[in-house]
Amino acid sequence: MNPLAGQLNAKLKTDSPHIYEMLSTLGKEIYFPKEGILSQSAEASSQAKKYNATIGIATENGGPMHLKVLQDSLSAFAPKDLYPYAPPAGKPELRNVWREKMIKDNPSLQDKKFSNPIVTNALTHGLSIVADLFADVGDAVIYPDKNWENYELTFAVRRGAEIITYPLFTEEMTFNSDGLRDALLAQKEKGKAIVVLNFPNNPTGYTPSVADGKKIVAAINEAAEAGINVVVVTDDAYFGLFFEDSLHESLFGSLLDLHPRILPIKVDGATKEEYVWGFRVGFITYGAQDLEAIVALEQKTLGIIRATISSGPHPSQTFILKALQDPNFKAQKEEKFQVMKGRANKVKELLNTDQYADTWEYYPFNSGYFMCLKLKDVSAEDVRLRLLREYEVGTIALGAHDLRIAFSCIAEEYLEDLFNLIYQAVQDVKKG
């Protein structure tokens, strides 16, 4: 093992032994090089005043070399904020601004200890870092039966973890905190579990109530009290898109300081929150309470980043930073929120009429981009294909009877036509 990795592990063993126990084999072995190209280049940047022949970019006229055809399209930004490599942890100004935004959006974070957000190449990269650092072959990764399929690729296929699911909803169509609790306590013998909490949920568009949020936190705490080390990942991809009375904060804040055996990790990003899907800017934030533990986790995270993507894209980080600092940002974001809320409300209005009652039920939704129909007596895949081939309508079939609808990408005035076409496709399938 590299001595730098050994030093980080020693700090964790001394100050946060349960976090050390949570690490995967790779998590224990990874480190960020202190004596390499990056560290020497950083040293040269501050001291090499005459010539700096270190980092692998080209320069001219005192700045980064670039093509005019590119700069003409990006003339609002200085070349220094576009073309050089971004630091592996991301632009420092962006990290600070995102932290301020997190606290403003989640008042429960005020005066609590947590790491500075590290920039990731959007949400999937953040989840991948979690998997690399904490998931070994056979480790339990727990999430609901209604879930984003990429979790299986990230945790099971890539890392060999065992996926444990529980029903998302109770019979009363509330969050199944007892199911989460039972799945967690079943890991007593392993002594470790990774829990993924995704609210608003993909695919259902569901966020639990405040009361159910407390039950979720209590279930996780009960597992920790039972001697289970729990890594809790809050996948907050759709954070902020809360249209009704539900949790309006990430559970990350409620999990901080809860128990030494609980490590909360927040994975979020500008991707969907700020409507910039192609920019691929996300963040990963650790809820460790000990400063040395935070430093160790940050260094190991930078090691993963260095070993995979080296650093995230610089231009998109600059674009996001400028947007977050713009005085018009808040009003423009609110405008888009109202559009999304209007679409969600229109869908619910349509579904609460009697015209579709014999054809489907729908799972609770109050947030996010999606909602899910539970079709009666027909195959969701058959309906999906009928919609696509006969009506040129795209939907997602999940399991035997669930059909996911992304109302986020359908203008409000077309939603009634959309659901009428889905209804017609179901009738077609029923007739064979």
Image (cartoon, helix red, strand yellow):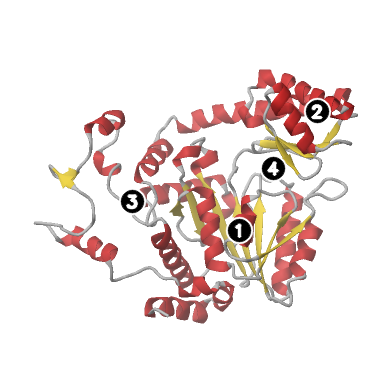
Q: Give the residue at x 68% y 76%.
A: 191
- The CA span between labels 1 and 3 is 26 Å
- As drawn, the label of residue 86 is 3
Which kind of residue does numbered mark 2 sit on?
Leu
Asked if residue 311 shows in the view, the reply is yes
- The CA span between labels 4 and 3 is 33 Å
Q: In the rendered view, tell whether residue 251 sits above or below residue 341.
A: below
- Which badge, 4 or 1, comes first in the chain's sequence? 4
- The CA span between labels 3 and 2 is 47 Å
Q: Give the residue at x 16% y 58%.
A: 53
* Residue 327, image x, y percentages: 42, 32
Asked if residue 286 shows in the view, the reply is no
- The CA span between labels 4 and 1 is 18 Å
- As drawn, the label of residue 233 is 1
- Which badge, 1 or 3, comes first in the chain's sequence? 3
* Residue 9, image x, y percentages: 47, 78
Q: Nearer the viewer, mark 4 or mark 2?
A: 4
